[in-house]
Amino acid sequence: MPKIRISSVIDAPIEKVWARIRDFNGLPGWHPRMVESEIEDGRKATDIGCVRKFKVASGATIREKLTAFSDDDFLTTYSIIGHPAPISNHSSTLKLERVTDGDRTYAVWTADFDAPADKGDEIAKGMGENVFQGGFNALKSHFSGQS
């Protein structure tokens, strides 16, 4: 089972970073690889069990189910339920923590999933670099005034 852990420090207060990322349907608003998103069945983006369907810049469609959400803990957890890559049993968590030195934010995005042995490392590398680190880079750029 591949495991991914990507972390970053964002030069902004945790409340501002959380306000930008907390909307489970808001990926296109802050992540450069995500181009459109919708919550299925008219549910709210904070309802545990809601499903978002989104398209990435490559044109692929992905479906993810919200499994945990906490404004108090600055945390969202979701599972991929539809993806063009051969993965299953996926779980990802995006969590923010307060850095009191300079009022910054420590962000960590983790995932684990099952994949065929010959594909797992490649999928994990792409998810870690393109999705997780790409998202953190966009957030850092946004909060430094470069976007």
Image (cartoon, grey):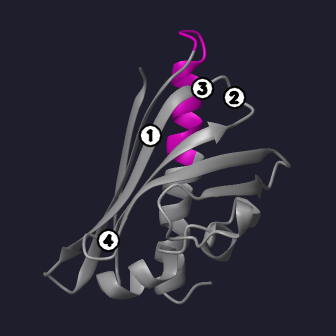
Tell me which numbered mark, 4 or 3, is placed earlier along the sequence. 4
Position of the N terminus by quadrant: top left
- Please report the residue visible at 70 percent of the width from the left and 59 percent of the height from the top: 33
Numbered mark located on residue 91 in the image: 1
- Where is residue 6? Give x, y as percent: 38, 48
- Report the side of 87 relative to 35 (left or right): left
Tell me which numbered mark, 2 or 1, is placed earlier along the sequence. 2
Kindly check if marks 3 and 2 are in contact, taking CB atoms under 8 A apart as contact: yes
Label 4 and label 2: CA atoms lie apart by 29 Å
* Range shown magenta: 116-129
Label 2 and label 1: CA atoms lie apart by 15 Å
The answer to whether 103 is drawn above or below residue 119 in the figure is below
- Residue in the foreground of this view, choosing between 50 and 58: 50
The answer to whether 107 is drawn above or below residue 86 in the figure is below
Q: Which residue is mark 2?
A: 85
- Residue in the foreground of this view, choosing between 147 and 30: 30
Q: Which residue is mark 3?
A: 87
- Residue in the foreground of this view, choosing between 128 and 42: 42
